Image (cartoon, rainbow, N blue to C red):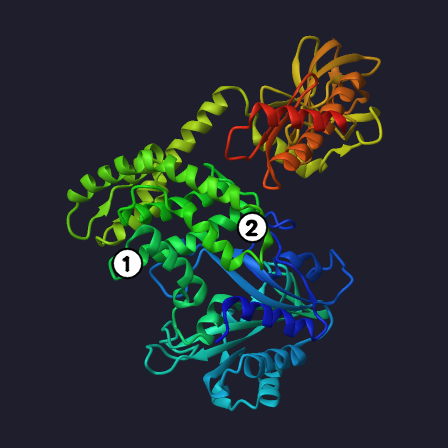
Amino acid sequence: MYSTNEIRQLFLDYFAGHSHQAVSSGPLIPQNDPTLMFANAGMVQFKNLFIGKESRDYKRAVSSQKCVRAGGKHNDLENVGYTARHHTFFEMLGNFSFGDYFKDLAIELAWLFVTRELGLPKDKLIVTVFAEDQEAHDLWRKIAGLSENRIIKINSSDNFWSMGETGPCGPCSEIFYDHGDKFPGGPPGSPEEDGDRFIEIWNLVFMQYEQTTPDVRVDLPKPSIDTGMGLERITAVLQGTNDNYSTDLFTSLINTSVELASVPNNKQFGVSHRVIADHLRASSFLIADGVMPSNEGRGYVLRRIMRRAMRHVHLMGCKDPLMYRLVPSLIDEMGKAFPELSRAELLISETLEMEEKRFRRTLDRGLKLLKEEVGQLGKDSELPGNVAFKLYDTYGFPIDLTQDALRRDGYKVDIAGFEKEMEKQKEEARSSWKGSGELEADEIWFELYELHGPTEFLGYNTEEAEGQIIAIIKDGELLEEAGKGDEVLILSNQTPFYAESGGQEGDKGSIYSDEFVVNVGDTSKRLGGLHIHHGIVNEGKLRVQTSVNLVVNSDRRRCLRAHHSATHMLHSALRSKLGQHVVQKGSLVAEDRLRFDFSHPNPISLEDLFEIEREVNQQ
């Protein structure tokens, strides 16, 4: 019987033997796709290759990609622990062709791998094809020798993949494994397809079209291949189980959880052990890739995952933090395949322990409130949204934790009411922000951006430039002109002024012509591309469409440049001394000082600080 690690390696070696470049997993935080919170498929790191924005010295690749699905469109969190195949973290095995081979070889390689390399019986396999893809249908008949009743045509989006409204797209073909009639469910495409009998193990995507508009689709000059096989699913099949949590990797983690918690893996606590094992994997890999628990963005998704697991630790009656004690077992199982996990072991353990200790301070009080509220609920009623929001806002309960806590008793949350309370809080925050004068009418910036596009930034090559005034704004209103003493925002067609970004303060200087002088006290950025000069008219009268000179304060720019370089040197020294886990979380680069925010679970000793200082000064 193959182990999980052996199956992963078998897949990589098989395709490497067929001229595929073995590529390490991309990070969980996508480097080239700001629309994704986390990598959720093998093709994510190759996206620019598929759309022609990048080229590499290979046209075939194979990988085992780390993936997370929790938060946003792809969210499996609420089902994890209760089903046989839902996970927040999983691995996606994949082989890829970038304009090299296409359907015939993709189908042949896949079929030979599952039948010869893995030894799966042919009569246990069925495939699906897109109903209009007769070519794929005929290739399965020819290459695999499958009968008509084992090739199912699917006339839905389930068998047609697209990257978005526009871009590469194409039909899919999926391979299913039949676990036998002892499990409920029917074949794909049937009304009973959601049962546990027929399990998809591999999806082959044939990228042969480009969607140029929502209504127009043309042939790609070089069709490509993108496939995905869930490692956890194929491992379950090969290890003779229908439940991913019964495979060797999860069994090892669950057995360690049972031993450390002194709580059996039975009907009462089985879900808790499964949740802890799954969430330990997701939390550990996210931390290793630089995500730290916080109250926003990716950090909040991590906190939600961790706290959901920590509630299950509490359910098992554990009085002390547990999850961090499971990390060595996880590294024993996965550290060789993913060395970044081993390198970050200390950071992972300390982060899990600190977060669990912090959450325990409010967990008991929050659960007490929840118990009191549930005691007042009638049959088929919901927990009021304002109570769920109080648990979130006061006790740090993510909404899915509250839902999970209610699940055992059969109650649900008034999600609409919760979202209403959340929106009310956001609106109050927005109102407070507007009242502080920080927000000028956003509509103006959208209009200006549409009319003129982004400001051309010249500051990498010069500190002086000529330009034209495009807009003058005061108190959220567009002006034709501004006089002496007026505080205004000035937009020009081009500028050498660096706009505040990434913690570095914006440039100061002056804008002038024969008719006026404006002292620029700050430069900010709107909509990612408009450089806004914040200034006071010192002399004369400023008018729209005037040709002007823009001059940066060069002495101040020099100081900012030095402090900017110093942040990079400091980051390097911190990683050298404290470990490669140190990730920049924010910074301030000012004329007279700098501040560098970073992730590290413990206070830094005075001795370490002196060593870091010495290393920076030696650079």
Name the side, left or right, on which 594 lies relative to 372: right
Q: Vertical placement of 72 versus 161: above or below? A: above
The front one of 378 and 281 is 281
- Give the residue type that dot 1 points to: Pro
Q: Quadrant of the C terminus?
A: top right
Q: Vertical placement of 114 versus 421: above or below? A: below
Name the side, left or right, on which 472 lies relative to 73: right
* Residue 80 visible, this orientation: no
Q: Vertical placement of 136 versus 226: above or below? A: below
- The answer for how far apart the CA atoms under marks 1 and 2 are is 29 Å
Q: Vertical placement of 464 versus 363: above or below? A: above
**For marks 1 and 2 on the same chain, the one whose residue lies earlier in the sequence:** 1
Label 1 sits on a secondary structure element that is loop
- Give the residue type that dot 2 points to: Ser
* Residue 61 visible, this orientation: yes
Image coords of residue 305 (percent x, y) = 42, 47
Q: Which residue is mark 1?
A: 264
Label 2 sits on a secondary structure element that is helix
Residue occupying image coordinates x 55% and y 71%: 203
Residue occupying image coordinates x 38% and y 77%: 197
Residue 476: quadrant of the picture: top right
Q: Which residue is mark 2?
A: 342
